[in-house]
Image: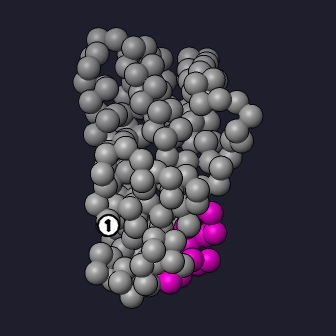
């Protein structure tokens, strides 16, 4: 299944989404599959079953769609990371496992968003890009705090390197094929990430 198909399927699955949310899901899938510049408002409208100009009722343009896709994701990762870190303040290993579980589940559920973030973040205007980068830095610091608690004496800079390496493992989901089922992919990603961070 392509990221375009994932986005289209996700728009109709689960709870009833607003039309704006459906359009955003479709746009994310198209951006991830074809690249930001490879998609026009008319393309998004056609995939969503509306005219391109009708999209402007929901979004000011493609940049607004991109920001609407990426800012809440970064905000949600930070909130989720903080929640997990606060859950077991005296158990850094438990917190690390909880953070890994949280991020792996996010990565498996959102491969199109990850692809979009990896390849298209620089398309955003400076202010939303700065906002996303700030949220990301704060999320990384949640991991740094746990890693330095788990590895006493480890400098923060080294913990940051490990955190980013872990994100590289977990955020590989846009590039994983369908050979291995979701449950096993989650197990493999969790195990590889935990092993890398405990070494």
Query: Nearest the camera: 61 or 76?
Result: 61
Q: Is residue 4 above or below residue 114?
A: below
* Extreme residue in the bottom direction: 53
Residue at 42 percent of width and 30 percent of height: 102
- Relative to 101, does residue 110 appear above or below in the rendering? below
Picture residue at 30% right of the left edge, 75% below the top: 58
Position in image of residue 149 (x %, y %): 39, 19
**Relative to the observer, which residue lies in front, 30 or 22?**
22
Residue topped by disc 1: 20
- The residue positioned 28% from the left and 60% from the top of the image is 18
Looking at the picture, tell me which residue is in the foreground, 41 or 133: 41
* Depth order, front residue of 108/97: 108
Give the magenta-colored segment's residue range.
31-42
Percent x, y for residue 50? 42, 78
Q: Quadrant of the C terminus?
A: top right
**Visual colour scheme:** one colour
Res. 167 visible in picture = no
The reply, left or right, for residue 110 in relation to residue 180 is left
User: Please, which residue is most extreme toward the right here?
Assistant: 179
Q: Is residue 76 in view?
A: yes
- Is 178 drawn above or below residue 9 in the view shown? above
Q: Position of residue 155 (x, y in %)?
A: 47, 29
What is the magenta segment's predominant secondary structure?
helix
**Whether residue 63 is situated above or below residue 52 in the rendered picture:** above
Is residue 169 part of the magenta span, yes or no? Answer: no
Quadrant housing residue 165: top right
Residue 183 image point, x, y percent = 58, 25
**Mark 1 crowd level (few <14, some 14–19, many ≥20, 10 Å Cα):** some
């Amino acid at each position: 299944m392509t990221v375009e198909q994932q986005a289209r399927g996700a728009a109709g699955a689960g709870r009833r989404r607003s039309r704006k949310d459906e359009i955003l899901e479709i746009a994310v899938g198209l951006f991830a599959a074809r690249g930001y510049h490879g998609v026009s408002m008319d393309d998004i409208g056609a995939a969503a079953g509306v005219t391109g100009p009708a999209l402007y009722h929901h979004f000011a343009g493609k940049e607004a769609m991109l920001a609407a896709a990426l800012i809440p994701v970064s905000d949600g990762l930070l909130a989720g990371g903080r929640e997990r870190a606060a859950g077991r303040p005296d158990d850094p290993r438990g917190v690390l496992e909880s953070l890994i579980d949280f991020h792996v589940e996010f990565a498996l559920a959102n491969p199109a968003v990850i692809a979009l973030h990896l390849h298209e973040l620089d398309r955003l205007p400076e202010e939303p890009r700065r906002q996303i980068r700030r949220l990301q830095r704060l999320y990384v610091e949640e991991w740094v705090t746990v890693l330095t608690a788990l590895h006493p004496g480890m400098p923060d800079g080294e913990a940051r390197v490990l955190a980013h390496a872990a994100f590289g493992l977990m955020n590989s989901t846009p590039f994983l094929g369908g050979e291995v089922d979701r449950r096993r992919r989650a197990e493999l990603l969790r195990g590889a990430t935990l092993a890398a961070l405990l070494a």
